[in-house]
Amino acid sequence: MLQPPLSSLQVAAVPAPRVPARDRDQDAPWHTEAVCRRDEAGLFFAPSKEPTAARLSREEAAKRVCAGCPVMVECREHALLQPEPYGVWGGLTAAERRVVLARRRRRDMELKKAARTSGRIAAAG
């Protein structure tokens, strides 16, 4: 007997087991295992002129789906490297991804500055 498809709330309530990346089929793209492929894209991307309360509620529901996804880290890194300007990817909203990217840029600049400073000290010593 066929069972009805799972609703997005049911998927979010039962997290998928996390499988380490090294144990997955390396030939398959990461997104083939994404839990969100079973959900409506509307959960992850805002409709135009969405009220703030509705947006926050939708984003939290999307993040619950992401939390149980076996490829959440790969999805997040994809969105940060592209960078994806819209939607919830890897459990982060577009605004949260901008913060992560700004922190990474700041950290990279500090590391480069520290490397230059230590190079000068070594040369002078």
Image (cartoon, grey):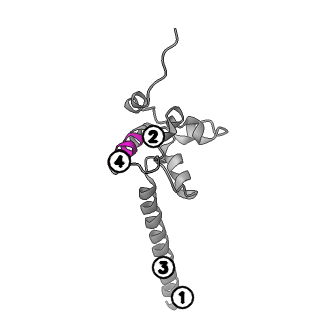
Q: Which of 16 and 24 is in front in this view?
A: 16
Which label number is shown at residue 5?
none
Residue type at the position of mark 3: Lys
Lateral position of residue 28 relative to residue 110, left or right: right
- Magenta region: 53-62
Residue type at the position of mark 2: Leu
Question: CA gap, disc 1 to disc 4?
Answer: 53 Å
Q: Earlier in the sequence, mark 3 or mark 1?
A: 3
Q: Mark 3 points at which residue?
A: 113
Across and down, in percent, residue 34 comes to 53, 37
Q: Which of marks 2 and 3 is nearer the N terminus?
A: 2
Please check the rendered image and state whether residue 54 is part of the magenta-colored stretch, yes or no.
yes
Lateral position of residue 52 relative to residue 122, left or right: left
Q: Name the residue under label 2.
A: 43
Question: CA gap, disc 2 to disc 4?
Answer: 11 Å
Residue type at the position of mark 4: Leu
Look at discs 2 and 1 and give the one toward the viewer. Answer: 2
**Residue at the outermost bottom position:** 124
